[in-house]
């Protein structure tokens, strides 16, 4: 026989605040703006440039 859950857990503002604070803290510690721009330049810059050129030619 399976147990039935008879209660619901309500998420409070402090729970949401705690989760957001953890998320922001991890993002700040793990990734700086310089690192993000380096990753963008390394992987996506040429692709975005080519896409922009293609779209601007069609207009």
Image (tube, grey):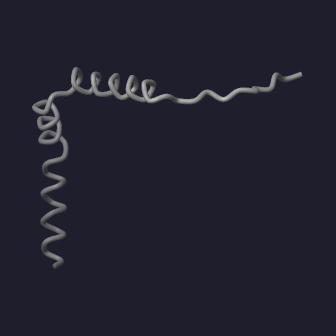
Residue at 66% x, 29% y: name it: 8
12 left or right of 19 in image = right
Seen from the viewer's position, the closer of residues 20 and 57 is 20
Residue at 23% across, 23% down: 30
Q: Is residue 43 left or right of residue 24?
A: left
Residue drawn at (32%, 24%) of the image: 21
Quadrant hosting residue 36: top left
Say which of 42 and 3 sits in front. Answer: 3
Q: Residue furthest front?
A: 13
Residue located farthest toward the right when viewing the structure as drawn = 1
At a point 45% along the width and 25% down the height, the residue shown is 15
Whole-percent x and y of residue 58?
18, 77
Instruction: Tell me residue 31's x, y (percent).
Output: 20, 27
Q: Quadrant of the N terminus?
A: top right
Quarter of the picture holding the C terminus: bottom left
Q: Is residue 6 above or below residue 53?
A: above
Q: Is residue 58 above or below residue 20?
A: below
Report the number of discs.
0
> Residue 13: x, y in percent?
44, 29
Q: Position of residue 44 (x, y in %)?
A: 19, 46
> Residue 17 is drawn in which quadrant?
top left
């Amino acid at each position: 026989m399976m147990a039935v859950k008879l209660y619901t857990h309500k998420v409070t503002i402090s729970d949401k605040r705690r989760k957001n604070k953890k998320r922001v803290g991890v993002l700040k510690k793990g990734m700086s703006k310089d690192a993000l721009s380096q990753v963008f330049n390394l992987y996506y810059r040429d692709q975005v440039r080519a896409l922009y050129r293609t779209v601007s030619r069609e207009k």
